[in-house]
Structure formats: C-alpha cells, structure tokens
Amino acid sequence: MTIRACPLSSPPCLRLFTPSQLDQHHFTMINVLLKFTQKSSIRILQVILSIAEHHSAIVPWQFVAQKTGAILKFVSLTDGEVPDVGKLREMLSKKTKLLVVHHVSNVLASVLPINQIVSWAHDVGAKVLVDACQSVPHMVVDVKNLDADFLVASSHKMCGPTGIGFLYGKSDLLSAMPPFLGGGEMIADVFLDHSTFAEPPSRFEAGTPAIGEAIGLGAAIDYLSGIGMQNIHDYEVELANYLYDSLQSIPNVRVYGPAPSKAIVRAALCSFNVEDVHPTDLATFLDQQHSIAIRSGHHCAQPLHRYLGINASARASLHFYNTKEDVDDFIEIVANEDALGHEKLLHAALHNSAVDFKAEVVDFEANVKAEVVDFEAEAMDLMELLIFKLIIEPLDFRLSLPSTMVNVPKTKKTYCKSKECRKHTLHKVTQYKKGKDSLAAQGKRRYDRKQSGYGGQTKPVFHKKAKTTKKIVLRLQCQGCKHVSQHPIKRCKHFEIGGDKKGKGTSLF
C-alpha cells in the first residue's frame, strides 16, 4: 500500500504502514539488529540518542543493547533547555552506526536542525532515524532536503485515526533488509523448505492491513494538504509564541523549553507547571470546570523529566483549529489565583486525606495481626482442652514406657475379672513386663491367625515394615477390689497394634 497524498516532499522512496509509532521503531530496530550483527567485526554497535526522545525511540534500542552489547549514548540539554547539538556532533564517530533523533520535541517544543544533523552523521557513515511525529502534522517536511535514511510519523497527531502510522525509508536500505514478520502478502513464493519474499514495502506488511485506518489516514493527509502545510506552520508559529509569552507572564508558572526568537522557532505546544498545583489536578480542574483539554504526566519522556528535576508537567498543545481567544480563555483561568487557590486547597485536602487513610490502613493491619495472634493462642488453648477432655481424662492410668512406643489395649472385657467384683470397670496400670522376642528372629514377619496352610500349621505372613516385634504384658489393677489382671500387648516400632487377642488396639499418642 502507498499513501496517495502526503505532506512529504520526497525523492523516489518507499513508505510502508505500521500499526503504531512504536512498531516503526521496532521495525527499524529489528532490521538494524539483523543487518549489523551478521559480521563479527561490527557487532559492537554505537547508537546515539538525545535525552529528550520519546520512550518509543529509546526502549527498542535498549533491547538492541541487551541482545548485542551495543552502546547507547545520550545527548543532554543546553542551558536553554534544548538538546545540545554541538555535543551531539562531537559524539559522532566511525563507531556510530545509528543516530536516533526527534525533529520536534513533544515536551520542550524545540525544533532541531535535522538537515545539518543528518549531514554530520553521514560524514562518519552512520544512518539516521528521524522521529517526525511532532513535525509532519505541523510543517512542510522535505525528506529530500533532510536526506534522512528513515523517518517515522503517526496518524492520530495529523487528524487521522489511531493505531496506524508510516515509516519512510530509502529504497536501497529497505531492499537490503530481510522481513521481520511472516504472513500473507509479504511473500513471493512459498515452498515446503523455503520461501521467497516480495519487494518492499509489501515485504514488511504481513497479514491483512488496517484498511479502514489507512483510508482514514489518507483522508487526513488530503485535508491537511488542502489547507496547506506552510499556511498551517506560519499560523501555528504565531499562536505558539503568543501562548509562550502569555504563560511566561504569570509569576507562579514555569515553562519548559527554549524561548522563541528570530533564530529559535518553537512548536505549537508548551509544557509547564504551576507552583503548588499538581499538573494532573490542574488538567482535571480545567477539564471538568471549564471544558479545556490539556495533557498531564510525563508525556512518555521520563528521562527528560528526571533531567529537569520534575516528575510530571502539564502540556497545552495547539493546532490550526485553535485561536488566540482559546489561548486567552486558558490563560485567564491559569492566572486566576482565586480559581487555582480552590484547586490548591482541594489538592491539599486530598493529600491530607491520603495521609490519614494510609495511617488508618497501618493501624488496621496492626489490629488484624494482633487479633490473629490472639486467635491462634485461643485456638491452641482450645486444642489442648479438647485433647485433655476427649483423650487423656477418660483414661485414668499412667504410662511408664516411652509414649512413642506404647499402645493402650482396647479390650472388650472392661469389667474386673474377679468374681467378687464385677461392678468396677476402671483399671490402673501398675507394671509392664516384657516378654521374649516372638517374631523379630523370624525375619520381620507375624502370624496371621485368620489364614491357614502348610499342613495345618499357621501360614506365616511377612510384616514388611516391622523391624522387631515383642510381647508385652500389661498388669491392670482394679481400683475397687485391687484384683490384678494381665493383658498381653503386641508392640512394633512402626505399627502400634492393640492389646486384645485379635491384635486390635488404639494408640493415644
């Protein structure tokens, strides 16, 4: 697919559609990665960027650095809060393989001399990727004059639909690049063992394209071209200077970026902060109370905001459909201390509420932990009580052998054996007597009286886990008549078998 009408004055080249600005950078990143890592002599790449780049122009090259060990170098700002072009020129060397640079900053509103920068990069053999998302919708962009190797732009900034953009690239560079996505429309022939690929741009447009979005982008380009890109630029420069001067006239407002002059042209946007007012609070206040839309946050430029010593800023952006009256209405509200005073109080109240809520959460967590500890203690006490009431208390005898080795006999005869005393049922342990080894010497087996065999003799059955088995005689004494009876017990180190004649029993421990 090609763009039917475009505000780019360009030589023979190719433009291809991408889902977004981020994908444009990823496309270039992947192909540069493939191209420059084929030869071991140039695996160590050096990529130069500015600190004011959009996240989508920084993060993909961080991926390259992680994969290849490439070195990323960043150009800082001058005292006038513009990227230091002189420092950039000094950083360029024969080691530089790629220069990634914006045309217009989406935070500082600075416009860089791209044609000079591209020329410096080409002098050392470096390729140049220009982020023109903020310039293509607002001015004439002559890629023939810029001589950029790659240039990216997005649709939604030029009055088009979201989710689509385009990448401009020189034909020879795109033709030398392999595809980075496989699918329909990007192939010439497909065989079972290999495939051949279409020529650019189709080679890089795998699958069904965003047809509706591409048509919408074409319509937006036609619309802007009908107005005239030079007309739009001239009008916006005047409006941008008016906005900058108006904001600078407010004492408690800090505007970021260079001041406009004959030599310095600012784009039609201003990033600023109002003293003691959070930019998000200001944006919400303007939106809900006055139907004025501005943006707040880091604007996908966190490194730049950190360099400026701030976390966020408010940004007022203008286009050809805005007027000076719009600027006046906006400035009147920002300059109104009474209106913003209410917002300051609201912000302070919200901040105090957040602090109080956090303290309440901490107290709640402490209370919950204390209650959990108390509940665990009560549960342990209850468990001990249940064990005592259900197990220990009903059995009134003392055990003299180690608890891990003892079984309490569960005999059916619970009454005293003495004929004179049959009403007393409680027995008291007085003594244990060990018998001789019965089964230990017979190879860890026991006799099962339920089975018979071997000439009428009892069939031996192996006790797989038992190591030793001994007979123990338990002497029980009646608490009434003091009659003493004996009860045999079978004891095993692994199985606790009870004390009746059938070998049944229950362990307390």
Image (cartoon, rainbow, N blue to C red):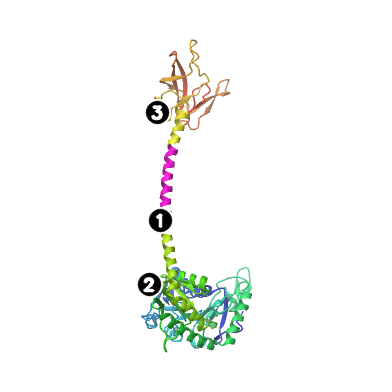
Residue 206 image offset from top left, x and y in percent: 60, 73
Marks 2 and 1, the one that precedes in the sequence: 2
Q: How many marks?
A: 3
Mark 2 or mark 3, earlier in chain = 2
Question: In terms of image quadrants, where is residue 201?
Answer: bottom right
Q: Please tell me whether mark 3 sits on a helix, a strand or a loop.
A: loop
Tag 3 residue: 402
Q: Look at discs 1 and 3 and give the one toward the viewer.
A: 1
22 falls in the magenta region: no
Residue at 45%, 17% in the rendered image: 486
In this picture, is 404 found above or below 214? above
- Residue occupied by mark 1: 359
Check disc 1 and report its element: helix, strand or loop.
helix
Three-letter amino acid code at disc 2?
Gly
* Amino acid type at image mark 1: Ala
Three-letter code, disc 3? Pro
Span shown in magenta: 359-380
Front residue of 325/38: it is 325
Which residue sits at x=42%, y=51%?
365
Q: Nearer the viewer, residue 475 or 339?
A: 339
Instruction: Give the image location of residue 428, x and y in percent.
Output: 43, 20
**Location of residue 380 with respect to 140 vertically, above or below:** above
Q: Which residue is mark 2?
A: 309
| 2 or 3: mark nearer the eye | 2
Where disc 2 sits, the SS reads: loop
Question: In the figure, residue 468 lies in which quadrant?
Answer: top left
Q: Residue furthest toward the left? A: 79
The quarter of the rendered structure image containing the C terminus is top left
Q: Name the one closer to the observer, 327 or 149.
A: 327
Q: Main secondary structure of the magenta part?
A: helix
